[in-house]
Amino acid sequence: MNDGGVDGHGRVYSCAEEFWEHVQAQRGRQDASDEQQGEWYKAAVQYWDCQAATNNGVLGGFGQVNPSDIMDSRKFLMKGLMPRIQEAKEQGRSLVAADCGAGIGRVTGSLLLHYFDQVDLVEPSGHLLETAKRNLVESKPANIPPTHRAVNFYQTGLEAFQPEQGRYDCLWIQWAIMYLTDEDAVQFFRRCASAMRPQGVIFLKENVCDNGFIVDSDDCSITRSHSYFVELFKKAGVRIAHSALQKNFPKQLFKVRMYALRFD
């Protein structure tokens, strides 16, 4: 991660390593300790605990992008997993997914439950996760196959999530890796290796900037460039099967890139 970046206070960094060192120093520590890492994540959860548990709230005031987001996500999911989904139906085998950074269950209800028999939700904000339970269990979304259901609701960040070994055909991670430090992102992907069933796919959908990185100090998130992500993937031992840009989002927003990732 040799390209430079900038944080929300206008401070410029020559490389990502310099930024993470600055974060550690701000916390009064000179090592990447559990205490320092916890402070970084605590600030992000506090931010989301204060946001409305609605589509508009979890989409940063741009609730109108929800239909375009789900439409392009569905196309991307089908490109990566359609043969597997068809094969599972023919063999009568259940498919299992995890929605990582699930929020209020927006993606689970609008997309994942249409194709997967079971979906686990992973979300650190308690009030968002409680809304997801109401949305998906107490009032099940329309047009979902009757046997498909949300199963587990894990209130935890991805930095601490320990996925069950061999459980998942699909991990859907959207606007969530942006809250992880580089080290924790790499470790998370490595833990996912043992959680995936054979030929399973990780789908990552994140904001991207043109070069380097941009930090949002309000919610403690980091927007990485495509080249930055490529380096992270190499460190984690995952390869890009295919990638595409989200279409039809407002021009004032970051570009959003989708990745289908597999383990070598």
Image (spheres, helix red, strand yellow):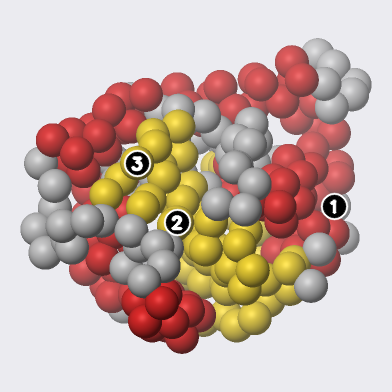
Residue 108 in picture, x, y percent from top left:
31, 54
- How crowded pointer 1 is (Cα within 10 Å; few <14, some 14-19, many 20+) is rated as some
Q: Is residue 210 above or below residue 158?
A: below
| Mark sitting on residue 151 | 3
Question: Considering the image in quadrants, where does the C terminus appear?
Answer: bottom right
- Quadrant of res 138: top left
Instruction: Please identify, in this view, whether the residue under mark 1 or under mark 2 is nearer the observer.
Output: 2
Compared across the picture, whether 241 is left or right of 256 comes to right
Residue 262 visible in this rendered orientation of the protein:
yes
Question: Considering the image in quadrants, where does the N terminus appear?
Answer: bottom right
Q: At numbered mark 1, what does the secondary structure look like: helix, strand or loop?
A: loop
Compared across the picture, whether 1 is left or right of 249 comes to right
- Quadrant of res 69: bottom left
The residue beneath circle 2 is 97
The residue beneath circle 1 is 14
Residue 207 in picture, x, y percent from top left:
52, 61
Residue 228 visible in this rendered orientation of the protein:
no
Q: Is residue 257 above or below residue 243?
A: above
Compared across the picture, whether 182 is left or right of 90 comes to right
Q: At numbered mark 3, what does the secondary structure look like: helix, strand or loop?
A: strand
Residue at the extreme front of the image, as rendered? 91
Residue type, numbered disc 1: Ser
Q: CA distance from mark 1 to mark 3?
A: 44 Å
